[in-house]
C-alpha cells in the first residue's frame, strides 16, 4: 500500500493564528483537507497519517479530533526544526509502505482524484510530481526505494535534496486541478479554497 503523509506541524506564522483550526465550510481547515484524502483511499492508497507537532495539550486535541474520524496521527518532537523532520518522522512510522505521498494539511481544495492519480502513477523506483498549468504542486509521491533517503532529511527544505539527487527518476503528472497549487498561508486564501471546493 502507498502511505499518505499529511504534514500538519507548521507554526502558521504567516496566517497569524493556528490555521489548522481556521473554519472552512463549517469545519476546521485540517479536517477539510483530511476529508479529501479519505475520499481518495482505495486498494492502493491507505488512509493518511497526519504528522503533528510535539505532544502538548493543543496537539492532543487535534489528535483526538482526527481519531473521531478514524484518522491516525503522530507527534513529531523535532517538528520545530523544519518540515523535513516531520517528513522523515512520518516515513519512520510507516516502514512497510510501498511508497509515500507527501501532502500538506493546508490544501483543502485539492481534489481526491488528484491524490489518487499520484498514488496510481507511483512506482518503487520513481518520484511523481503533479503539475497544473506546468506549475508543480502537491502531493509528491516517492517510491519505496527512496525510503532510506527520506529518513535522513533534516531542516526546512522538505525533500528538495532527494528531488535534486534523482532527476532521472522524476515523473511529471499534469492534472486538471488548481487545488494542487493552493496552500492556505493567509486568511484571505480561505475564500479562494472554498470557491475551488464548491
Image (spheres, rainbow, N blue to C red):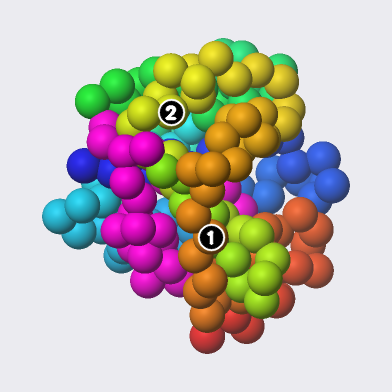
Q: Position of residue 5 (x, y in %)?
A: 43, 39
Left or right: where 131 falls relative to 41: right
In this view of the protein, which residue sits in the foreground, 134 or 14?
A: 134
In this view of the protein, which residue sits in the foreground, 158 or 195?
A: 158
Q: Is residue 17 visible?
A: yes
SS of the residue under disc 1: strand
Q: Is residue 83 visible?
A: no
Q: Residue drawn 36% across and 28% down?
A: 145
Give the residues in magenta.
97-125
Q: Residue drawn 27% across and 32% down?
A: 97
Per the rendering, the mark at residue 76 is none
Give the residue number, with chain letter if any, for mark 1. 172
Seen in the picture, residue 95 relative to 134 is either above or below; the reply is: above
Q: Position of residue 22 (x, y in %)?
A: 64, 56
Residue farthest to the left, as pictured: 43
Give the residue number, with chain letter if any, for mark 2. 146
Query: Neighbour class for label 2 at 10 Å: few (<14), some, many (≥20)?
Result: some
Seen in the picture, residue 26 relative to 150 is either above or below; the reply is: below
Left or right: where 113 falls relative to 164: left
Q: Along the polypeptide, which appears first: circle 2 or circle 1? A: 2
Amino acid at each position: 500500500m502507498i502511505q499518505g503523509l499529511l504534514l500538519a506541524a507548521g507554526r502558521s506564522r504567516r496566517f497569524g493564528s493556528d490555521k489548522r483550526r481556521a473554519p472552512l465550510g463549517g469545519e476546521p481547515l485540517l479536517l477539510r483537507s483530511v476529508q479529501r484524502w479519505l475520499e481518495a483511499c482505495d486498494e492502493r492508497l491507505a488512509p493518511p497519517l497526519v504528522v503533528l507537532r510535539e505532544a502538548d495539550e493543543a496537539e492532543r486535541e487535534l489528535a483526538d479530533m482526527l481519531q473521531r474520524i478514524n484518522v491516525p496521527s503522530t507527534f513529531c518532537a523535532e517538528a520545530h526544526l523544519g518540515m523535513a523532520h516531520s517528513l522523515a518522522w512520518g516515513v519512520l512510522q510507516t516502514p512497510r509502505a510501498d511508497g509515500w505521498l507527501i501532502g500538506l494539511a493546508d490544501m483543502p481544495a485539492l481534489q481526491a482524484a488528484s491524490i489518487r492519480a499520484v498514488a496510481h502513477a507511483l512506482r518503487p523506483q520513481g518520484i511523481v510530481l503533479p503539475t497544473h498549468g506546468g506549475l508543480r504542486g502537491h502531493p509528491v509521491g516517492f517510491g519505496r526505494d527512496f525510503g532510506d533517503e527520506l529518513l535522513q532529511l533534516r531542516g526546512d527544505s522538505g525533500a528538495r535534496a532527494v528531488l535534486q539527487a534523482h532527476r532521472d527518476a522524476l515523473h511529471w503528472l499534469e492534472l486538471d486541478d488548481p487545488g494542487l497549487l493552493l496552500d492556505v498561508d493567509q486568511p484571505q486564501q480561505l475564500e479562494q479554497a472554498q470557491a475551488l471546493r464548491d
